[in-house]
Image (spheres, helix red, strand yellow):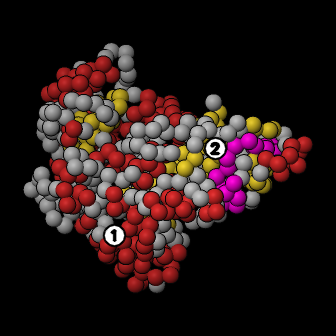
Amino acid sequence: MTERTLRTVLLRGGSVYSPADPFASAMLVEGEHVAWVGSDGAAEAYADIADEIVELDGALVTPAFVDAHVHATSTGLALTGLDLTGCPSLPEALRRIAAFAAPGAAGGVLIGHGWDESGWPEGRPPTLAELDAAAGGAALYLSRTDVHSAVASTALRALTPGLDTLPGHSADGALTRDAHHAVRRAALAHLTDAQRRAAQQATLARAASLGIGSLHECGGPDISSEQDLAALLALAAGQDGPEVFGYWGELGGVETARRLGAVGAGGDLFVDGALGSHTACLHTRYEDAPHTGTAYLSADQIADHVTACTEAGLQAGFHAIGDAALTAVVEGVRTAADRLGPARVKALRHRVEHAEALDDKAVAAFVELGLVASVQPAFDATWGGPDGMYVQRLGAERAAALNPFAALLRAGVPLAFGSDAPVTALDPWGTVRAAAFHRTPAHRISARAAFTAHTRGGWRALGRDQDGVLVPGAVASYAVWAGGDLVVQAPDSRVADWSTDPRSGTPGLPDLTPGRPLPVCLRTVVRGRTAYQV
């Protein structure tokens, strides 16, 4: 244990968000753990033993956030390169592509992200001819915002053997399904080690600057590579920054997950695709397409995977968005529970990523099977509402049923919040806001419950129930936020009114009312080590 690990730090003069003392204004950290929380008056007794005293000046101290679903390399490439998120039109997208591909702007295969034709006046992605012209003949991979389809230039297509024989191939338009996976693998294979490291470092730095102390990386053969996950885990382990826990999404990939040091054989193990790309698997056809999406795995395959993971003592997980995909997950996990006994299956807290199109029956099945819902509230903020992409794809009635966070919470399903970056941005307070002010009021949860899902929920998803809170003995991973009024926000005003009464002992959080500025991070500490400081 190094001298730095053993440092004793006293924080005082602010607000500490802690179940140990709802009125705490000070905290003592010894090495990697919280030693004490309490009042400023009582903190005086520790001033003489502290190696450092942090005067909070009214700042708020909270547990560091956990982003339970990220793709670090892709996020970093978007942060440092071509990101079309929010681009208003096809001509503007082509202009930005041309600027990015200009001589000297980049080399090798060019990689970008974020186009979304559902919000463009043209209502379509670029054609192959338009893309080639903008890219100047360069090999270019450009993923759609949901990362379940992409456009690829002629030069990149030429680097992907057998592309035109794969399901999801289009000679002129966006690539989906196996064709998309193949062209993505070809693009990522041309990244140099230095480019990969720079992208991953950019993601870790951005996360730390936002008060994120832990990331769940969702890798796999169809989304990244073994080399990519191994490099990220090594990078994170070798520096004072956010912790990274890896998931490897390969069917039957128990041994590979273990060899890579992953905590689970899941994450983006695709049962289906995404609604925006018309590849989420539905029971009833899309409103704007004559089909029901794509099924990548059957219930039998899911059952076999969960069985293998459970027998190996390893957490399984699946990407499932559409209602038919979620039905397959429930049926498969239930079959595994019948084989092995429900207690063994429930004990490992197998995960479902996204879990958007859940009905009451599916929610009850999540409870029965002990499944964790790893969900992304920013999806609703981005694509929900009466004019959003969800309504375009599903119609108003089905769209309004998506992302039922309140029903999941009431039923007792463990929630772990994430961003799926780069699909939506690393933005923890924005994520909490999105859940508290869901576009469908019936699905809203309190800001406190949303905050818990984005802090302690991520640790619970890993089976670590003791972490994600600031209490004596807990790991000292925390963030300090610029001071401001603290409030209690809940969907039911009667709850909020009682919670703001001092007798309730309910600690407050920043006001997340839409339109108000989000809290600014001043410092992020991971296991007692400073990862970010203004």
Give how far across and how far down residue 383 sits, in percent. 28, 47
Element type where label 2 sits in the image: strand
Q: Is 461 part of what is drawn in magenta?
A: no
Left-right relation of 497 to 492: right
Magenta part mainly helix, strand or loop? loop
Can residue 246 be seen in this snapshot? no
Residue ID for mark 1: 329
Give the total number of marks visible in the rendering: 2
Q: Can you say whether 385 is above or below 404 in the image?
A: above
Q: Which image quadrant is residue 499 in? A: bottom right
Q: In the figure, is residue 264 to the left or right of 240? A: left
Please name whichever residue, 284 or 266, is drawn nearer the observer in this view of the structure.
Answer: 284
Residue range in magenta is: 6-23
| Amino acid bearing label 2 | Leu
* Disc 1, SS: helix
Q: Amino acid at mark 1?
A: Val
Residue 172 rendering spot, x and y as whole percentages: 13, 37
Q: Which mark is residue 60?
A: 2
Task: Give the image location of residue 244, x and y in percent.
Answer: 56, 49
Where is 84 relative to 222, above or below? above
Would you say residue 329 is visible in this rendering? yes
Residue 309 location (% of width, % of height): 47, 70
Name which residue lies at 31% across and 33% down. Answer: 86
- The image quadrant that residue 8 belongs to is top right
Above or below for 62 versus 136: below
